[in-house]
Image: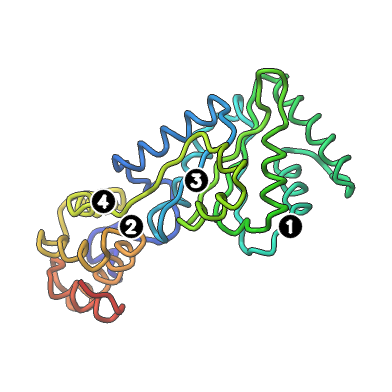
Amino acid sequence: MDYLAFYDLRQEPFSVMPLTKFYYHSEQHDRALAKLQFAVSAMKGLAVLVGDVGTGKTTLARRLLDSLPEDEYEASLLVIIHSDVDADWFVRRIMGQLGVPDPPADRSAALTQLFARLAEINEQGRKAVVIIDEAQMLRQPLLMETLRGLLNLELPEQKLLSFVLFGLPELDAVLQKDAPLAQRIAVRHQLEPFATATTADYIDHRLSLAGRDAPIFTAAALDTVHAVAKGVPRVINVVCDNALFEGYIRKAPAIDVDIIQNVASDLGLHE
């Protein structure tokens, strides 16, 4: 028997993977999603969401992508994994994401082909949206200039391409290095850690989706989880996952403060 069976769970409730099934409708996440949906629906051009590590940016990016109907949007998600990305790679990747096969190596020819594809999407009555996760990695000045140029691809009174950038707070500083680009930010939102009550509701929400009807964590344990995780969703998941395993080893019917404190100590977390 593993901890899932011991606590009557159908699946892991606290996986750190950004699973959209476990999306939690916190007030701030729903507000952020609504603002970003407004930005792309109105083709505002550039929207930015920032937040510290573990606050739910990647989950929200996937949630945004899933919320955009295919018959209304040509939308894609691009994850930047290193800071060596250059402008040529960026343009070619966006073209590939938007359905342009074999983009030419010549920059001007590529942009001409991209414009034609964006015009085609617009004629279909759809909107082109590129969502970029880990956007703080886009640090090269020429790349920022290229992004600004892509935002200039438009028809009279109609923008052809919208970007939504998700990144760490340092993304603000990256964008400010290109003042004309920073001035084009039409919508911005910053994610914050959960409040204590939100942490407790978040934990209950995930347990319920995983098949558990009755509480597992005591009220004091929930407060302690919030304190050691400092309200950061990803850290909450790690603490709770370890706590369930520790509780299973102890054969504890409930997760109490002692279990949370022991897990936190093992993880190097402190209130």
Q: Distance between the residues labelled 1 and 2?
A: 32 Å
Point out the tag, 2 or 4, that comes first from the N-terminus: 4
Query: Mark 3 sits on what residue?
Result: 61
Q: Where is residue 43 in the image (x, y as percent from the top left)?
A: 58, 27
Q: Residues within 10 Å of mark 2 (few under 14, many from 20)?
A: many
Q: Distance between the residues labelled 1 and 3?
A: 23 Å
At label 4, the amino acid type is Tyr
Q: Is mark 4 on a helix, strand or loop?
A: helix
Q: Which mark is residue 202?
A: 4
Q: Residue 233 carries which label?
A: 2
The N terminus is located in which quarter? bottom left
Point out the tag, 1 or 3, that comes first from the N-terminus: 3
At label 1, the amino acid type is Asp
Point out the tag, 1 or 2, that comes first from the N-terminus: 1
Query: Mark 1 sits on what residue?
Result: 86
Q: Residue at x 24, y 54 (%)?
A: 203
Discs 2, 4 touching: Cβ within 8 Å: yes
Q: What element carries label 1?
A: loop
Which of these two is toward me, 224 or 105?
105
In the visual, does 169 lie left or right of 106? Answer: left
Q: In which quarter of the image is residue 218?
A: bottom left
Discs 3, 2 touching: Cβ within 8 Å: no
Discs 4, 1 touching: Cβ within 8 Å: no
In the visual, does 107 lie left or right of 243? Answer: right
